[in-house]
Image: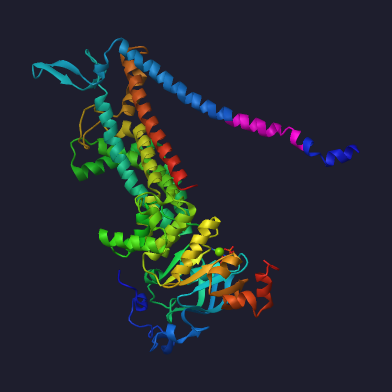
Amino acid sequence: MRTMSVLDMFEFKTDEETGTLPRKEARPKTPLSQIETHEGQPIKIMTRNLSVFYGINQALINVTMDIPQKAVTALIGPSGCGKSTFLRSLNRMNDSILGARTDGKVLIDGINIYAPGINVVALRRLAGMVFQKSNPFPKSIFDNVAYGPRLHGIQNASVLEELVEEALKKAALWEEVKDRLGRSALELSGGQQQRVCIARALAVNPEIVLMDEPASALDPISTAKIEELIHELKKNYTIVIVTHNMQQAARVSDFTGYFYLGSLVEFGTTKKIFTTPDKKETEDYITGRFG
Amino acid sequence: MRSMSVSHPTTHELLSQKGFRLKEWLIERMLVAAGITSIAIILLIFLFLFKEGVQFFKTASPFDLIGKTVFDPYEERHVFKMMWQAVSVLPKYSLIPLICGSLLVALPATIIAAVFGIGCAIYLSEMASAQLREFLKPTLELLAGIPSVVIGFFMLTLAASFFQGIFHTKFRLNAFVGAVGVAIATFPIIVTLVEDALRAVPRDLRDASYALGATKWQTIWDTVVPTAISGISAAMILGFGRALGETMIVVMATGKAPIVTGNIFSSVRTMTANIAAELGSVAQGSEHYYALFLVGSVLFTMTFVLNLTSEIILTKMRRKLRM
Ligand SMILES: Nc1ncnc2c1ncn2[C@@H]1O[C@H](COP(=O)(O)OP(=O)(O)OP(=O)(O)O)[C@@H](O)[C@H]1O
Ligand SMILES: [Mg+2]
């Protein structure tokens, strides 16, 4: 499959006419991801004053955050603090929620994905998503993984087979299912189902993988497998993961953001957040004195 | 001391208490009784129909239900005829023209109702705004509430002439006119059932599809409809059962000629119309009377099997979607 360029997100040629972006950000001489750094890492996703409202209820308040490329960024915080909302705003999944409204900017490789003229289909190919509850389609394992490529017009059977095999290998599931690709994905165990979902997301060649508590419904062994997989994937993908499990955040992530009541309280390397956080609230949450 | 033991029962006392609540026991028994009664009623109808039906074979052979070899005075030779002609010197009781008539009305009716019904259900469940749905759902219920005699009357008077004008058919009243009328009667059921099936598709499956870059239409065709396909088939089977059983509209709009034909613009007689037309004027205990019960038994068996199939499909679907 042809790899995505960020410019594919545009149905129109430039976004200068739309006036949504300063010229410098829209047309960086060197890709932004190489200039902007956070703790020495190039930045893939930047949010600027990102607010999300559900009707009159504000779920995210002015979140400004730099998410480094090819690293794992964990989002932690008590229930209802807006972690899922934040994650879903990174590939505009909130668009389909009735009454949801987004303010501010989300820049992927310097391009504001909320600017008019952005191709949401291309955006979602660029930023795939894995959900909390594994949600394979009631179709065969093969058809699950081939769903995305087929959507994007790939019909050729041998190309599809190749893509499916590649994605299942990346999701560390190939060996377990290669003999029963035609069987229903619902016959698999919970952990295997979740890896089908990961394979399905990887099959469209994204650059970013958003994961919302991908292991919260799994047993410890399946969880360990997923964590191992995340570790492997970060070589090629920018990963953002929501988790309720402190140990998991500490184990898998390079960067951590702590959310509370819709605001980003603190963001930094996982090491710093877990050892010497700047804010008292963060420390209280991490050490379990709260939440 | 006594009050102590009441407020703090020992483990032994707790566990040996009888968990008996009269009200719950009564309600439970009543529900069981209601269930058993309805099953018993169905069984009784079933038995009654068959008991009367089989008596037909006291005087006639099972082969008579297919057809009879009779002398044709015009062709001046014996020919095999599949006819329903109960009032005749030589009565003929072939079920074939009746079954043929029923299918020729019910199949097209189901197809028409399904095409419009599924489209309408997809629109209602996936596209219409909440306000529009609020308006359309009661309208649909209104349509479901139209007595079938009114639909029959409408088909007989206005629609039949209209269709004859379009198709230039030989018979003004024919299977097609009946099928359209029956489709109007089955349409609301199909919409309701299909919409239920579509709405039962979990939101996270749609989300998964959108997250892979699918558009709304791609999500509907590639995820929602395939996931709901058993529910949709169940709705169609149930609709087909209803169409087979529909009586008043076909009595009025199909013309009642009991002939074996595949021509949808031919006048036909369905099993239901046949029973409705003849049972009132037949002598109890006559061969004709028993033959009509046999027709009823066939009809009952067909609709029963259809309903059962649809129920089995639905149960399987619910299990599959883990609902
Ligand atoms: N679809 C929705 N419609 C209305 N309000 C919503 C919706 N989704 C989330 N919210 C509200 O937005 C706030 C943030 O929700 P969100 O799901 O982002 O929290 P979360 O941090 O992911 O919580 P959890 O850890 O329990 O998953 C909550 O107050 C929630 O009630
Ligand atoms: Mg959440």
Quadrant for residue A209, please give it.
bottom left
Where residue B119 sits: x, y (%)?
35, 51
Q: Is residue B261 left or right of residue B211?
A: left
What residue sits 28% from the left and 63% below the top?
Answer: A154
The residue drawn where x is 69% and y is 33% is B23
Q: In the orientation shown, which residue stands out farthest toward the right?
A: B1
**Considering depth in this image, is A274 or B256 the residue closer to the camera?**
A274
Query: Is residue A125 or residue B262 the one in the foreground?
Result: A125
Q: Quadrant of the N terminus of chain A?
A: bottom left
Residue A206 placed where, x, y %?
39, 70
Image coords of residue A50 (percent x, y): 53, 77
- Ligand 2 lies in which image quarter? bottom right
Classify residue B7 as left or right of residue B158: right
Seen from the viewer's position, the closer of residues B7 and B248 is B7
Residue B4, image quadrant: top right
A243 sits left or right of B305 in the view: right
Whether residue A21 is visible here, answered yes or no, is no
Specify the quadrant of the image occupied by residue B266: top left
Compared to residue B244, the image places residue A13 above or below, namely below
Report the magenta residues as a range: B14-31
